[in-house]
């Protein structure tokens, strides 16, 4: 199936389950879904069958609050039946508002920001120790970058020459309080990572073709960790949600849900 | 008959304690330009957006960086600012624990740490977002006072008193609207002195924060249905603990139950147990809190009900204790 069609299907499912659960991180799930789409359908060497293999590629979602994006993709890849998502955020369900390893396909429990990169660096270092050639990917929000742990891990990753590690920054420009540049400016981000010894590429993070190209070019430099700065739109795909702060964890009303689903109608 | 000291209106909900906190702080900031709030992308959850609009020069945003939040707060406090560092209790007291221990408590910088959406307020967001460890870790750190108000009266009083104090504090708030425990406008509140909400001579229920109200409801139910009369205490200050009140309760009541929205390990219950045992009060005693297990998933109400931290659950635990007296 065509990747763009998949992205639309995923976006519909994200909204469907957030609407049902009456909870979720809508804007950030819509901004990063194209990245997850390309990762799980084109890049990662992982499937329900290989999930316990020590040689599988790892994906650790540092911006854990956008769990809806991860869950719809994992369901689509067959890690669990999609109908499980009917229980999202319900009493005694393991499908909660952040990734947990109780859900098949989830590598690590996340939700507190700034943990994905250090854990990923650890998994990547283990690959080097064991001479395995799996790769490790982590997805971070631009708002979570001020957590110091990220920069500690950025140093370690360079020190150990972790070219099997790839961080993706979902640069949607917004967090909860406001635009990321007004809350705590991290620009110029590429220069920061470069000075920490990383190989950096920019990409349109909502363009599946461009994403595939950039992932195909990994590692960008031998013996250096790679970071992809993915320029995205928070709320991407639904006109009234795009670049709107309130959709960080906004839940659509029935009316809004209908309009959003119309906008996300599958291509004829 | 039990003696109702404070009249909590049944079924009437007031404001959430963390909302009352931000309103009170705004009032204080109007006359004290030295008050500074520090946030870590948390002003929305802390209901501090109006504060930021009104006093833009008195709010400092550090971004999503709780360690930096507490370190900066300590620095600001050392230079004479009256600092309130506001962040979800889970991140504030776990991520930034070393900054709390060294930069605030050990260095004696009088920061007021404000943990919002505490306990299991965040419900289905899961364990990363729950703070069931904060009493335990902070109790083990010297030079920080731990205050957990139950309603808006206690919240206003606590915020005013800590603002006037030159010592480090941790204040813990939930986000559920809480009924006012006293409709008649009580005026006495003192940090370090437990607040007796109801008197009865059979069992003492010692609770804090959002668990005081269900404890009071349970006491009424026990009185009406089982003839068991319970004293209910809002032990808003865990440290320093009101030892005088504890010894009075140990003498007056036949059994003691503690209730908290925290792990059963290291919180209010164990603080009371330790003091009572060391002082040779041997009574039927139990701790009601979140057990040491993978926390059940669900909303705050579902999690609390699951573990019996509810009117029905507390009443049933009291009945069991009462059979041992
Ligand atoms: C350590 C930590 N601090 C605070 C939070 C609360 N929080 C959840 S999402 C969020 C904003 C995240 O912004 P960003 O990383 O830009 O994510 P996105 O915009 O992609 O959703 C915050 C502050 C958290 N989950 N973890």
Image (spheres, rainbow, N blue to C red):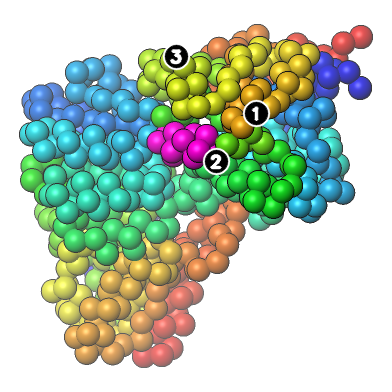
* Residue A70 as seen in the image, left or right of residue B231: right
* First in sequence: mark 1 vs mark 2: 2
The outermost residue toward the front is: A222
Q: Residue at x 23, y 34 (%)?
A: B72
Residue A185, percent across and down? 39, 18
Q: For label 2, count other residues whose C-alpha is less than 10 Å away and answer few (under 14), some (14-19) or many (20+).
A: some
* First in sequence: mark 2 vs mark 3: 2
Residue assigned mark 3: A188
**Vertical position of residue A5 compared to residue B190: above or below:** above
The chain that hosts pointer 3 is A
**Which quadrant would the N terminus of chain B be assigned to in this image?**
bottom left
Residue assigned mark 1: A222
* First in sequence: mark 1 vs mark 3: 3
User: Is residue A149 one of those drawn in magenta?
Assistant: yes
Looking at the rendered structure, whether the residues under marks 2 and 3 are on a common chain is answered as: yes
Residue assigned mark 2: A160
Q: Residue at x 59, y 59 (%)?
A: B296
User: Is residue B140 one of those drawn in magenta?
Assistant: no
Dot 3 lies on which element? loop
Looking at the rendered structure, whether the residues under marks 1 and 2 are on a common chain is answered as: yes
- Give residue B85's quadrant in the image: top left
The answer for how far apart the CA atoms under marks 1 and 3 are is 23 Å
The answer for how far apart the CA atoms under marks 1 and 2 are is 12 Å
Magenta stretch: give its range. Answer: A147-159
């Amino acid at each position: 199936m065509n990747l763009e069609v998949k992205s639309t299907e995923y976006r519909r499912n994200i909204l469907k389950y957030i609407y049902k659960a009456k909870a979720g991180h809508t804007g950030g799930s819509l901004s990063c879904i194209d990245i997850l789409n390309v990762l799980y359908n084109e890049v990662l060497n992982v499937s329900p069958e290989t999930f316990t293999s020590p040689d599988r590629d790892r994906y650790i979602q540092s911006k854990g609050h956008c769990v809806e994006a991860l869950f719809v993709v994992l369901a689509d890849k067959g890690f669990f039946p999609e109908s499980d998502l009917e229980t999202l955020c319900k009493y005694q369900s393991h499908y909660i508002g952040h990734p947990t390893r109780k859900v098949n396909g989830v590598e690590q429990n996340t939700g507190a920001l700034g943990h994905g990169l250090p854990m990923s660096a650890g998994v990547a270092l283990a690959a080097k120790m064991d001479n395995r050639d799996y790769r490790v990917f982590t997805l971070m929000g631009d708002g979570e970058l001020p957590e110091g742990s990220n920069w500690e891990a950025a140093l370690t990753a360079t020190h150990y020459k972790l070219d099997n590690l790839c961080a993706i920054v979902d640069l949607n420009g917004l967090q909860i309080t406001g635009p990321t540049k007004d809350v705590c400016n991290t620009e110029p981000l590429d220069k920061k990572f470069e000075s920490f010894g990383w190989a950096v590429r920019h990409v349109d993070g909502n363009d599946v073709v461009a994403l595939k190209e950039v992932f195909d070019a990994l590692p960008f430099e031998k013996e250096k960790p790679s970071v992809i700065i993915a320029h995205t739109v928070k709320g991407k795909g639904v006109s009234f949600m795009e670049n709107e702060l309130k959709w960080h964890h906004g839940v659509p009303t029935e009316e809004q849900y209908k309009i959003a689903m119309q906008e996300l109608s599958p291509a004829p | 008959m039990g003696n109702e000291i404070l009249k909590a209106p049944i079924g009437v909900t007031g404001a959430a304690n963390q909302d009352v906190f931000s309103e009170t702080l705004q009032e204080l900031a109007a006359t004290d330009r030295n008050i500074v709030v520090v946030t870590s992308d948390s002003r929305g959850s802390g209901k501090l957006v109006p504060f930021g609009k009104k006093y833009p020069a008195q709010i400092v945003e550090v971004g999503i960086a709780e360690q930096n939040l507490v370190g900066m707060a300590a620095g600001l406090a050392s230079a004479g600012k009256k600092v309130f560092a506001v962040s979800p209790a889970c991140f504030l007291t776990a991520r930034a624990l070393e900054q709390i221990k060294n930069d605030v408590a050990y260095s004696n910088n009088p920061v007021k740490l404000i943990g919002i959406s505490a306990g299991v307020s965040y419900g289905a967001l899961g364990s990363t977002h729950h703070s069931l460890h904060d009493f335990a870790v902070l109790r083990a750190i010297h030079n920080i006072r731990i205050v957990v108000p139950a309603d808006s009266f206690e919240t206003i009083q606590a915020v005013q008193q800590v603002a006037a104090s030159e010592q480090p504090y941790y204040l813990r708030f939930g986000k559920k609207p809480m009924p006012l425990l006293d409709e008649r406008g009580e005026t006495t509140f003192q940090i370090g002195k437990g607040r007796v909400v109801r008197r009865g001579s059979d069992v003492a229920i010692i609770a804090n924060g959002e668990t005081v109200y269900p404890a009071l409801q349970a006491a009424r139910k026990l009185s009406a249905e089982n003839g068991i009369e319970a004293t209910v205490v809002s032990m808003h200050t865990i440290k320093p603990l009101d030892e005088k009140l504890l010894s009075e309760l140990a003498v007056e009541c036949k059994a003691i139950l503690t209730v908290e929205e925290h792990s059963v390990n290291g919180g209010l219950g164990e603080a009371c147990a330790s003091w009572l045992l060391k002082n040779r009060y041997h009574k039927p005693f139990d701790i009601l809190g979140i057990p040491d297990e993978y926390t059940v998933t669900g909303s705050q109400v579902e999690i609390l009900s699951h573990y019996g931290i509810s009117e029905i659950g507390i009443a049933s635990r009291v009945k069991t204790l009462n059979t041992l007296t």
